[in-house]
Amino acid sequence: MNIKRNILHLIESYDQIIIHRHLRPDMDAIGSQYGLYLTIKENYPDKRVYVVGDSNDMVYLAKMDVIPDAYYINALAIITDVSVSRLISDDRYKLATDVIIIDHHQNDTDVENVTLFYKDPTFASASEMIVDIIKEMNLKVTPEAATYLYGGMVTDTGRFLYLNNASKTFELASYITKFEPSVQDFYDYIYTEPLQKRLTKNLFSSFEITENGVAYRKNDAELIQKSGLEFQAISRGMVNQMAGIKEIPIWANFTEDVENNLIVGEFRARGITIVDIAKKFGGGGHNQACGASLKDWNEVDLVLKDLDERAKENAKNIK
């Protein structure tokens, strides 16, 4: 039995299933979590299935469940789009009888007593991994589930700009669209915004550049408060304000998280592997799109030093 069959076997073995994903979710975290939830509900209507975690403006129409600890007794927990324990939203998965992790990031897991760890960085998104399981196991899919899964695929690839295996991604995107996702409604939700929010983005339009062409921003608590935007909209939402510039091969966005007393760094690159730098500072992600939670602004400067050195090395290699 392959791991996808083993995952389905565990799902079929439990009457109660609780699905988690990472903190401060992006659309792939929500898409994989909620798309899987809806698919299990459609194929196994007698099962009790729940989704848990924090919310933000990436959740689309999904509603998280508020459940007591007792629901984890004799239950299966599934975690999508994350394998690092400190990044999982709601740590009560530890109370479950069995735990499955489905993740497409480069990180190994530090979660103890994992029953099945399905890690495959050749997929461009966790939603794509769920679609692949659905396709191989020939599961029924509703248009609502298809919308979340397609949405996760679209956003985590930057509208199919960042691909690990293009033929596989497009094949699975084609497959999930057969189930008639609400593509236009989803695009209207994710790619339109109020005028005031668009104007507020001007606060984040400027950036600094290191000696070797690394663009970066440092967003302190005062600026965050002034903007009126939620944290995720600045931390992850503003990093690509610096993308698409010929002279900038690497860019980074650092945002102060006063509540948790740390600095959240988002790192991106064009054609250069930088995930090892993220891992060095306790983070991770993809080869060219990753991040880390940093202790203070001094550690931010250490990250910038490493990113600048990587940009310098790359410039030498392409001469």
Image: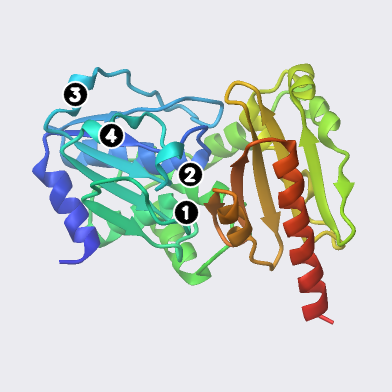
Residue found at the far bottom of this picture: 319
Label 1 vs label 3, nearer the camera = 3
Query: In the image, what residue type sits under mark 4?
Result: Tyr
Q: How far apart are marks 2 and 1 (CA)?
A: 7 Å
Q: Report the residue at 78% width, 44% height from top.
A: 241
**Residue under pointer 3:** 71
Q: What residue type is labelled 1?
A: Ser
Judging from the image, what secondary structure is the residue with disc 3 in? helix
Disc 2 vs disc 1: Cβ atoms closer than 8 Å?
yes
The residue singled out by tag 4 in the image is 93
Residue 188 drawn at (x, y percent):
61, 34
x, y (%) of residue 108? Answer: 40, 56
Q: Could you tell me how far apart the alpha carbons at marks 3 and 4 are, in whole angstroms?
A: 10 Å
Answer above or below: position of 72 versus 178.
above
Image: 87 above or below 285 = above
State the scheme by which the image is colored.
Answer: rainbow
Residue type at mark 3? Answer: Tyr
Circles 1 and 4: CB distance less than 8 Å? no
Which mark, residue 28?
2
Instruction: Tell me the SS state at disc 1.
Output: loop
Q: Earlier in the sequence, mark 1 or mark 3?
A: 3
